[in-house]
Image (cartoon, rainbow, N blue to C red):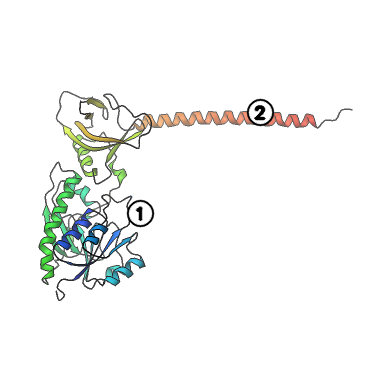
Amino acid sequence: MSNPNPRIVLAGSVVSSLRGLDALVRNGANVVGVAGLAKSKSRLVSGYTRMDDSAARARIPYLDFEDINTEEVCRAVEGWAPDLLFVVGLSQIVRRPLLSLPTIGCIGFHPTWLPIGRGRAPLAWLVLDGVPGAATFFLMNADVDSGPILIQEPFFVGATDYAADVEQKMLDAIDRALDQWIPRLKAGEWDPQPQDDTAATYNGSRRPEDALIQWDKSALEIASLVRAASMPHPGAYTYVSGHRLTIWRAEPMKDNRHRGVVGRILKLDAAGHLLVQTGGGLICVTEYEIDGAEGVLPHLVPGVKLGYEPQHEIHRLVSMITRLQQEVRELHRVLAAKDEHRTMNVSFSGESVS
């Protein structure tokens, strides 16, 4: 590279963005600007993190944005005159003209062994698949996570890891990757390696509603979902007595002494742990909370059923609709009788007496 110690701008919105910034500063990279997602747009961002304090401590100019592709952001980044734009932990797609501003290029980050695992929700998919990840920095292009790779630093994903465990391993891998690569970058090394597109796999997005627990699944499948949806994600969930029950931690159990109806609590121990029957084995729910509960909370005791029974709920709704229809018909009958009575009164009051 003809430009040693290039001018760098970093954009992001989550803890990996901050970890990347700290690593760049620690390695003496020439960071000339930081752009962070505004708090007003943080509601749907898992693990939202601000970078303004870290930027201030390093005396780096900072910009809040709601949409990274606005003219205002482009003007600010252009004013920083970057050679490289790092985009780390940002769900928004960076478009032109912002992509074209850096003189060398834009660097993206993805925590999988690219070209395997391109796409959305990588942490959750890593937990669900139980496969190794990698802190991968690559040169961005027009396609998703498909540009030439600058460095990949592996990390292990265990069979019982929760999303937070994998996130921590990913953050440590970011440190190792940038501690190796930034000194080489400052020395003028630049050797992006093309990805093998024939080996690429793609993961689709995951939304909060995808973490709804289906109790007829096996205990292993449910435990995997709980681990994948756990913090910093919104959590796996079910319903009980009209309330939403978020489950943060759960483990499959080898227990041949208990069995019951799928979804029903079989046992409550002194620690408040719930033993629940699934469609394949038992699961022990060890950490949970009832969200947004008001008034009297449901008692989570043996015999209580978790989740909704579709046929029962349909019957309840049909019965409710039938009652409402009867009440509407009765109301119409009463109103019609009142109208008839009012009409008769008007008629009598209009008659003359001879």
Q: Tag 2: residue type?
A: Ala
Give the residue at mark 1.
Answer: 40
Point out the frontmost of discs 2 and 1: 1
Relative depth, front residue between 258 and 270: 270
As drawn, which residue projects farthest toward the right? 354
Relative depth, front residue between 219 and 59: 59
Q: Determine the secondary structure under disc 2.
A: helix
Q: Is residue 283 left or right of residue 347?
A: left
Relative depth, front residue between 124 and 41: 41
Tell me how many marks there are.
2
Give the residue at mark 2.
Answer: 337
Task: Evaluate whether residue 196 shows in this view.
Answer: no
The span from disc 2 to disc 1 (Cα, nearest Å) is 56 Å
Q: Earlier in the sequence, mark 2 or mark 1?
A: 1
- Quadrant for the C terminus, please: top right
The numbered dot on residue 268 is none
Residues packed near mark 1 inside 10 Å, few (<14), some (14 to 19) or many (20 plus):
few
Please provide percent x and percent y for residue 331. Answer: 59, 30
